[in-house]
Amino acid sequence: DQQVKQNSPSLSVQEGRISILNCDYTNSMFDYFLWYKKYPAEGPTFLISISSIKDKNEDGRFTVFLNKSAKHLSLHIVPSQPGDSAVYFCAAFPGAQKLVFGQGTRLTINP
Amino acid sequence: NAGVTQTPKFQVLKTGQSMTLQCAQDMNHEYMSWYRQDPGMGLRLIHYSVGAGITDQGEVPNGYNVSRSTTEDFPLRLLSAAPSQTSVYFCASSNLGADTQYFGPGTRLTVL
């Protein structure tokens, strides 16, 4: 039973445009979320997080939005750059150090 | 500061063979964990440890053993490899209570 779902396996965006990656979750007890970025042959690296007491968190070109009523979060990248091409994982942090990951979305930024 | 290191990077095993995937971290993190990544499944937690001498099972522990004799090392043992264990394995570490985990570069394992 996938508690965190990323329903788009891949996304292709033109350089300079906005990339929007989506994530849905089923457990209403989840109250903290993270996005990780993964390049080929490397481990995932932390990108940005959001707590349920907020509905938005920004860090430079990256913004994460959280809609608690819809159990949905999204990662916006503006403007998209070629170096953003990677696999992006959404994860919930239910506590006790555990992370519950989504399936990942492969983002390709085209020149 | 090397962070989280994993060896080997690649491994091919035959069904029934055993092996140990090594993981080490030099950040003095109490928490260490093992994940496997499979297509369409994301990363799934296998085992984790909150300190030396303490380990517990994650979501998919069957077929794997772990031990934690030091803060730095957290090896993952496959006692009798099966083709279903073909995957990419990631080790991660963090301070206790921290949400952000630091991942190693991964070990790609193929079981024939």
Image (spheres, helix red, strand yellow):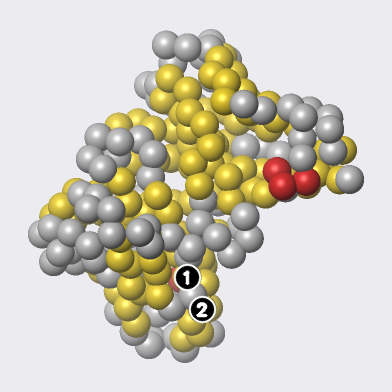
Percent from the top left, x then y, of residue B20?
A: 32, 78
- The percent position of residue A73, horizontal first and vertical second, equals 58, 23
The residue at the point 39 percent across, 39 percent down is B100
| Residue A78 drawn above or below residue B78 | above
- Is tag 2's residue or tag 1's residue first in the polypeptide sequence? 2
In front here: B98 or B86? Answer: B98
CB of mark 2 within 8 Å of CB of mark 1? yes
- On residue B61, the disc is none
Residue at the image point whose x is 51% and y is 67% from the top: B87
B90 lies left or right of A105: left
Q: Which residue was labeled with disc 2?
A: B10
Q: Secondary structure at mark 1?
A: strand
Query: Compared with residue B46, is residue B66 higher up or lower down, i.e. above or below?
Result: below
Quarter of the view holding residue A20: top right
In the depicted view, which residue is nearer to us: B2 or A32?
B2
Do discs 2 and 1 share a chain? yes
Residue B107, label in figure: 1
Please tell me in which quadrant of the rendered image residue A63 appears: top right
Q: Amino acid at mark 2?
A: Phe
